[in-house]
Image: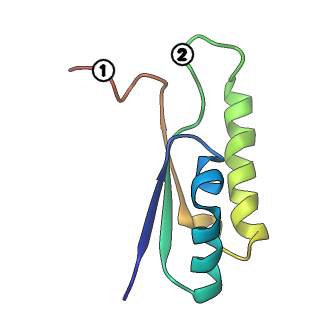
Amino acid sequence: MKKILIIATHPDDEVIGCGEKILSCIRDKIPFKIIIVTSSTPDKSEIYSSETSEIRETESKNMIIFAGGNSKNLIFLKSGKNSLLKKE
């Protein structure tokens, strides 16, 4: 059985880059997951507040539901702006 994994950096990147694939998975009942790495919350910036991040996550969930899918297909890692670049 075919399964699809879509990885997006920010909310809405999944639609911009893979919108047609998401729709075809929903239409053809192909199992898929979307991992969204960050929620656009740059450190120490009020431009992308936690409220804005929640709005963008809700928009991604609403997009999946509107297209006929299930918001359980979305996984939000909520990594910070530079957390993937930090050395331990």
Of all residues shown, which one is farthest toward the right?
A: 66
| Horizontal side, residue 6 vs residue 42: left or right | left
Q: In the displayed structure, does residue 83 sit left or right of residue 47?
A: left
Closer-to-camera residue (59/13): 13
To which quarter of the image does residue 50 belong?
Answer: top right
State how far apart marks 1 and 2 are (Cα): 13 Å
Identify which residue is drawn at 71% across, 42% down.
56
Quick one: label 1, few (<14), some, or many (20+) residues within 10 Å? few
Q: Residue at x 54, y 16 (%)?
A: 43
Residue with the mark numbered 2: 43
Mark nearer the N terminus (1 vs 2): 2
Of the residues shown, which amino acid type is indicated by label 2? Asp
* Residue annotated with mark 1: 86
Q: Quadrant of residue 5?
A: bottom left
Quarter placement of the N terminus? bottom left
Residue at position x 58%, y 36% in the image: 39
Q: Position of residue 66 (x, y in %)?
A: 79, 68
In the image, residue 47 sits, relative to residue 75, either above or below, namely above
Q: As shown in the figure, which amino acid type bears the numbered disc 1? A: Lys
Quarter holding the C terminus is top left
Q: Residue at x 67, y 74 (%)?
A: 69
Image spot of residue 76 (x, y percent): 52, 48
Q: Secondary structure at mark 1?
A: loop
Q: Give x and y (percent) for residue 72.
A: 58, 66
Which label sits on residue 49?
none
As drawn, 65 above or below 30? above
Query: Which x, y percent locates residue 23?
Result: 65, 73
